[in-house]
Amino acid sequence: MAIIRVFLSKRKNSNFWQMRWIDPDTGREKWQSTKTNIKRDAEREAGRIEKELNEGTYYRRSTISWKDFRSRYETEVAVGHAIRTQQKIGTVFNYVETHCNPKRLVNLNETAISKMVKKLREKGLEEVTIKNSLGHLKSALEWGKSQKLIGQVPDFPKFRRARTKKAMRGRPITLEEFERMIEAIPEVIKPLGKSEGSLERHAEIVASWEFYLWGLWWSGLRLEESMNLYWDREDALCVDLEGEFPMLRIRAEAEKGNKDRMLPMTPEFAEFLEDVPEDERTGPVFNPRANKQYRDRMLPSSVSKIVADIGEKANVVVGDKGNMDKVTGERKFRFASAHDLRRAFGMRWSKRVREFELKELMRHESIATTQEFYIEENTQDTARSIWAACQADSRSTSRSTRKKSPKRKKSHRIKRDSYST
């Protein structure tokens, strides 16, 4: 590799000494001011720049705007990620523009990032969400450094590591609670009119939501997976009822783990799907409908909100938000969501299959996730059942002993003092 030499020169239109060298990438001559008219200081600066050029650490302060940086990253880097990841990156960049509003990339420094974290906390975002968002931002800035757009990546705030195990935001709901949600659907999605046509359309909409919620209950699918489940599309999550066992085919683009997979389907969900007439097995499996249909299908975010509204109307409380309502002063509760139906599915099957089988059924990337959220809870249930059975058996034995055993003599009784020896 050729050594880069930096030379000093004087230009007629400048009082400062100028450095010049040949850029090895372009073959063109580059000039840069030393910002001094003292030759000895200029030589020191030229020596420093020459050293950085040969070590590959040279950086010239970039003037790229934040807008141009975002455009480059989204079109050159983010586009290669999964759709969900692209959406998260876009959300993080929106946070930056809302709370930092940097004109240039170099304006996004430690102070700006710290202020953004403060604003996100005030907004109510959880620590893990903020931490993950900063991870995407840091990756983007590291790419900017590799492109010589910034000299160094700013230091990011450190988050304290939680000492307790990660808790579920909700909980597995019971069958009785789920049936209450089914009954609450007409109370959330009300008819737009009283005409026969309006009532008939309303009945169809309610039926589409009943089918959807039962599908979540039996399948354990994540909400976005369920909205991307098709009967006949190879480029999406697809149902396959033709083989020896019913299966789900998941393409990498449609799955959180970003891998092509063939996964088993539970018998209950298979029977649920087989009840659908064959001539209706086209397009999306689930298509919950809205009263006001603005597009062909509802967005996952809209579906999620309506499921949460149904959980609230059914009064299925799954947790405490940990804060008070600023208007009423009452404690805020978390009501059942689509993911709580998935939790219920996981808890039911944790009692029927081994943990590595449950991992595949839940499509967890790590067995640790399965163990953390389901196996320990199942162990608690097992312990509870064992103790209940033991206590019931003890009461039964005690009753039978009182009825059948002869009265013992006083000499057979163990004195309390004997335990102390």
Image (tube, helix red, strand yellow):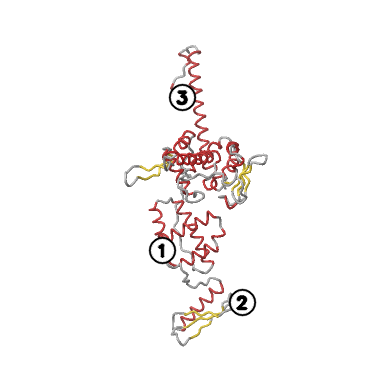
Label 1 and label 2: CA atoms lie apart by 42 Å
Q: Is residue 118 above or below residue 367?
A: below
Q: What crowding class fits label 3: few (fewer than 14 Cα within 10 Å), some (14-19), or many (20 or more)?
A: few
Mark 1, secondary structure of its residue: loop
Q: Residue furthest bottom?
A: 12
Q: Name the quadrant containing residue 371.
A: top right
Residue corresponding to mark 3? 419
Which residue is labeled 1 in the image? 101
- Element marked by disc 2: loop
Q: Residue 353 at x, y = what percent?
A: 59, 37
Q: CA distance from mark 1 to mark 3?
A: 75 Å
Q: Position of residue 44 (x, y in %)?
A: 48, 79
Number of the front mark, 3 or 2: 2
In the rendered image of this protein, does residue 151 appear above or below residue 2? Answer: above
Res 255 label? none
Amino acid residing under circle 3: Tyr
Type of amino acid at the residue the image marks with label 1: Asn
Disc 2 residue type?
Ala
Crowd band around label 1 with a 10 angstrom C-alpha radius: few (<14), some (14–19), many (20+): some
- Residue depicted at 53% across the width and 79% down the height: 30
| Residue 416 in picture, x, y percent from top left | 43, 22
Q: Pick whichever, 50 or 262, lies toward us.
A: 262
For this view, does 356 lie left or right of residue 31? right
Is tag 3's residue or tag 2's residue first in the polypeptide sequence? 2
Image quarter of the N terminus: bottom right
Residue 192 quadrant? top left
Q: Which residue is mark 2?
A: 2
Q: Earlier in the sequence, mark 1 or mark 2?
A: 2
User: Nearer the N terminus, badge 1 or badge 3?
Assistant: 1
Q: CA distance from mark 3 to mark 2?
A: 89 Å
Give the residue displayed 49% in from the left and 45% down from the top.
289
